[in-house]
Amino acid sequence: MKVILLQDVKTLGKKGDVVNVNDGYARNFLLPKKAAVEATQEAMKALKHEQRTQEKKEQEILDQASQLGNELKDKKIVIAVKAGEGGRLFGSVTTKDIADAIASQLKQKIDRKKIVLDEPIRELGTHQIPIKLHANVTTQLIVQVIEA
């Protein structure tokens, strides 16, 4: 019996896959648990429509991320912090500080989790910071840390 999986099933496949299973397995396990539906013509049409809709959403998200990446590419933000001798900061500049600076200076709201910072910035100077806006879109931002 052909079924369309409504959720991931370890031994069969992922959500949306069309698989061939034994009739008993489908009737006694997959269908009652609503893990699958029988692969009728209507169900196949609905699946194709859902996949197209999902692809459009993903493309829209990718386009928005690309547009934001182009706007932020090589932009410069300035963060003023207290520093001691030798350019060492009292404290550090974190992803939250960078996200707040982007929001105030560039008028763009970015989730701080998208800012890739191996460790907080602890020195004055100019730093190249990668921002991962999407799985396929990464841009560079210049962060200049100055003494307040």
Image: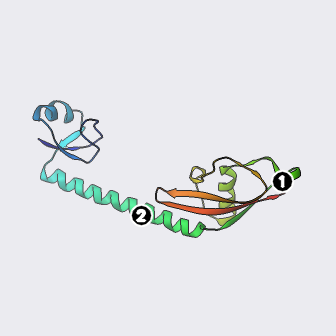
The structure residue drawn at horizontal position 29% and vertical position 45%, both measured from the top left corner, is 15
Q: Dividing the image into 4 quarters, which one contains the N terminus?
A: top left
Q: Which residue in the structure is indicated by mark 1?
A: 87
The structure residue drawn at horizontal position 45% and vertical position 66%, both measured from the top left corner, is 63
Instruction: Please state which amino acid type lies under the numbered disc 2.
Output: Glu
Q: Secondary structure at mark 1?
A: helix
Q: Secondary structure at mark 2?
A: helix
Q: Nearer the viewer, residue 115 or 33?
A: 115
Instruction: Please state which amino acid type lies under the numbered disc 1.
Output: Gly
- State whether residue 107 is above or below residue 16: below
Q: Quadrant of residue 58?
A: bottom left
Q: Position of residue 83 (x, y in %)?
A: 84, 51
- Separation of marks 2 and 1 at Cα, in angstroms: 43 Å
Query: Residue 60's mark?
Result: 2
Task: Please give left or right for residue 140 compared with residue 43 in the image.
Answer: right
Q: Earlier in the sequence, mark 2 or mark 1?
A: 2
Q: Position of residue 60 (x, y in %)?
A: 41, 63
- State whether residue 25 is above or below residue 103: above
The figure's colour scheme reads: rainbow
Residue farthest right in this picture: 85
